[in-house]
Structures are given as structure tokens and as C-alpha cells.
Amino acid sequence: MRIAAALLALALAACGQTTEAPPAAEETSTVVRVPPPWFICDSINLPAVFVFDRNAQDVRIAEYTKADGSIVQRNGYSVGVEEGAAGSVNIELFRDGGSDGQARYTNPGMLETPASAYTSRFVSVMLDSRDIQCRWTPRARVLGFTSRRSIVVSEDASGALTYSAYNFADSATQRARDGAENARATAASLELTGGVAAETPQARTYTFETQGFRYVLTLNRDGTGALDVTRDGAPLQNEPLIGYQLGAPPAATPAQ
């Protein structure tokens, strides 16, 4: 199956890892660990984040609680029937000989702005009778999460960057809503504009500043990452990323 117009990359920070990261490859763009994930579902109706990894017909799902970012469980599934309906694709997930759920995504061509699908628009997942609604942001460059919050860096049609943080402490009072260009979201705990992207041989960074505060989201070549916040140059907090995925503009369709 081809997931339309999406580039996903995930880095999961292993707890207690003591081995050194492998040396960076001699490239000019950020590289993260492979195989790439299928997608991340940051739930907008449940206090959890789900990381999906797919290898052919095998799927591994890691569930993290928004109480403290700890992992709740990992489960293995197999991909069953994939059926298209009304501009969406429903993908059966099963284990132990029975159907236990499905993942549903929207074809980019059905979106208000197809070119906004920097990541695949997975809208919902059913797992063991749980209806999980997923966050989706048009033109998302990054979707990641720490033990305290989910983070999205997105851009508008002109390329201007926005940082949106969704604090886990606020998740109990957040309500899912539909946004512009088919967004699926909750109210942001913090939103900053005017970001600057940069890239070095070691990392990709997104930097946002406001009233003396500086927010830097770093995505390292070795697949790790972190959110660092300073005030007037003094460190305030450092939050390692547990996981993240990257998005990119879809490839242009060749003229016929």
C-alpha cells in the first residue's frame, strides 16, 4: 500500500540507553533511524499517544500515557483487508486470529488543500473497542512528544512557521475540534509564530522567540531530540523527545 504524499520519520528515545549513538553519515539533510514509522496518533479524545510502526503486514503499536509520558503497552498486530470508501481507506488490524481494530486515513485528493498533506491524514484508530481520534495538522513539519506535552511545528502556505504545544496537564479539559484545511485539533496550550528553521550536519532545529523566551526544538541525526527553553539566555527546561515524525510537502504531480 502506498500512503499518499507523506514523509514520516520517527525517533524513539530509549529509556536508560547507555550505548553511544552511531556516527553521523556524511549528508546535508537530517537522517533519523530506520525503518521509518507508519504514523503517530496523538489522541484528541483520550489521554494517550500511540506510535505505529509497520513492516510489510506486521504492525507494532506503542501506547504512551499523557499522565507522565510513560509507556503503557506494546502490542503486535497484522494488517488485514484494506478497503477504500468515500475518499478514505480503512485498514483492518487483527491479532490472535480475530479482528481487533482498524486504522482510517483520508486520501489527500479529498482534502480542501491536497498539497497541505505533509503527513498522511490518519483520522482515527479502533483498538480493542477503543475509538481513538487522531490529531492532524496541515503542513506539519514535525509532530513529536515529550513526557509533558505534544508539539507540532507547522507552516502556512507562504512557509511561515508556527509552534503549537499541547500540554498533557490540559488534556482532560481539551475538546476535539475541526480546523481550517481539514485540521483535527484541540486548543493549543501555547502557540508561537515567526519561527526559524536551520540545519547543520548534526541536527535540524526550529527556533521561536517571544518576550525574552526562546524555544528550540532540536532533531538530532542520531534520532534523538529535545525541546529547550531559555529566558534571557538562562536555561529554564529541557525535555527530551520520546518520539517524533517529520513531514514534507508532497511531490508535485507530473503534467500530463
Image (spheres, rainbow, N blue to C red):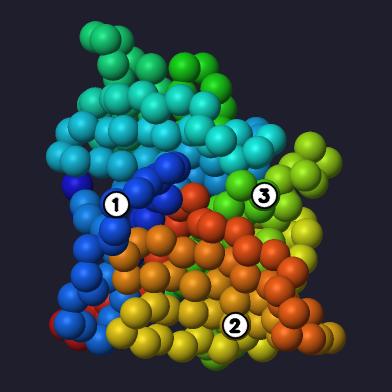
Observer-side mark, 2 or 1, equals 1
Quarter of the image where one finds residue 45 = top right
Q: Amino acid at mark 1?
A: Thr
- Percent coordinates x, y for residue 231 in the rendering: 78, 80
Residue at position x 83%, y 41% from top? 173
Residue 121 location (% of width, % of height): 45, 54
In front of the other: 11 or 252? 11
Q: Which amino acid, mark 3?
A: Arg
Q: Is residue 33 above or below residue 127?
A: below
Observer-nearest of 9 and 25: 25
Q: Earlier in the sequence, mark 1 or mark 3?
A: 1
Q: Which residue is mark 1?
A: 19
Q: Residues within 10 Å of mark 2 (few under 14, many from 20)?
A: many
Q: CA distance from mark 2 to mark 1?
A: 29 Å
Q: Which mark lies nearer to you, 1 or 3?
A: 1
Q: Which mark is residue 148?
A: 3
Number of labelled discs? Answer: 3
* 3D distance between C-alphas at marks 1 and 3: 25 Å
Query: Which of the numbered marks, if any, corresponds to residue 207?
Result: 2
Q: Earlier in the sequence, mark 2 or mark 1?
A: 1
